[in-house]
Amino acid sequence: MAKDNNILIEQIGFTKKIILNKPEKRNSLDENMISEIKNYFEEFSNDLETKTIVLCGKGGNFSTGFSLEYINKISKYDAIENKKDSDNYKELLLSIYNCRKPVIAMVEGYALAAGCCIASACDLIIASNKAQFGFTEVKIGFVPSISIIFLLKRISESNVKDLILTSRFITAIDAHKIGLVNYVIEENMLNAYVENICREINQSSFSSLLFAKEIIRNAVNMSFESALSYAADMNVIVRMTEDCKKGMMRFLTKDFSPSTKKKKN
């Protein structure tokens, strides 16, 4: 179902697809698209019809980052306007990273600059074998400072330096080797593979998905001892949920019911 000209929304079962729809400009972004994408993530994070979210681009590319028109506009901003615009972009990335539902970036073609950063904020990146990633900002005198923070959550400091300082493009295979990409799939099989991953995730209960994301997001910033203490406390909370109780009962019934036991000769 279409929501507006530049962003399309489709629902397949419990999966929402947020589709960047500016194929003639390789799905480049402007401030309106940034706000719209953020609003959709905030909406889908809390609805009961969504278990997984796929972010992708139409026309064979994910996104090449900010549009030329948007960059021209930014070049004329004063400090106050730049602060407001920078915060808007930061809030978009946080809406993806903090989304309560698993988020998958399905990447075809180019994922460059802000486009690559948006993919980095997702939980999983599943890329076509023909996809390319890169950050070109330093070539024009800019520094992708917000992107650096999200990259450091996915790959090593050394690899972040390599990508940012050289501005080189890397293939999906190389992106997988450094940990930026989770899976590399043949281009003609990409959509089917992503749909299958979503179906597998969607079989889990709402609460288990929500708690899993929350625990991972919080624990990664704690000391080892604090993280263990936090995990033990969360264990108690999770075990008390109805989803967990019902799930354990189904597991026990399935494994130990008389119908599943081998008959004796």
Image (tube, helix red, strand yellow):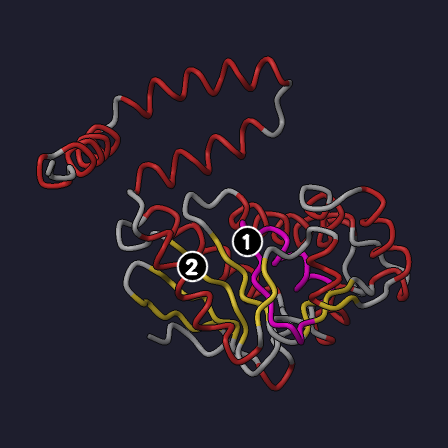
Query: Residue 239 location, x and y as percent?
Result: 29, 23
Residue at 38% x, 38% y: name it: 210
Residue at 77% x, 43% y: name it: 156
- Residue highlighted by disc 2: 197
**In terms of depth relative to the viewer, which is nearer, 3 or 97?**
97
Magenta stretch contains residue 160: no
**In terms of depth relative to the viewer, which is nearer, 32 or 105?**
105
> In the shown orientation, is residue 125 left or right of residue 19?
right
Q: Upstream in the sequence, badge 2 or badge 1?
A: 1
Name the amino acid type tagged 2: Ile
Query: Residue 123 location, x and y as percent?
Result: 54, 49
Element on which disc 2 rests: helix
Query: Residue 124 location, x and y as percent?
Result: 55, 53
**In terms of depth relative to the viewer, which is nearer, 93 or 110?**
110
Q: Which residues are magenta?
A: 112-131
- Corner quadrant of residue 180: bottom right
Residues packed near mark 1 inside 10 Å, few (<14), some (14 to 19) or many (20 plus) = some
- Residue highlighted by disc 1: 124
Query: Residue 26 location, x and y as percent?
Result: 64, 79
> In the shown orientation, is residue 206 left or right of residue 184?
left
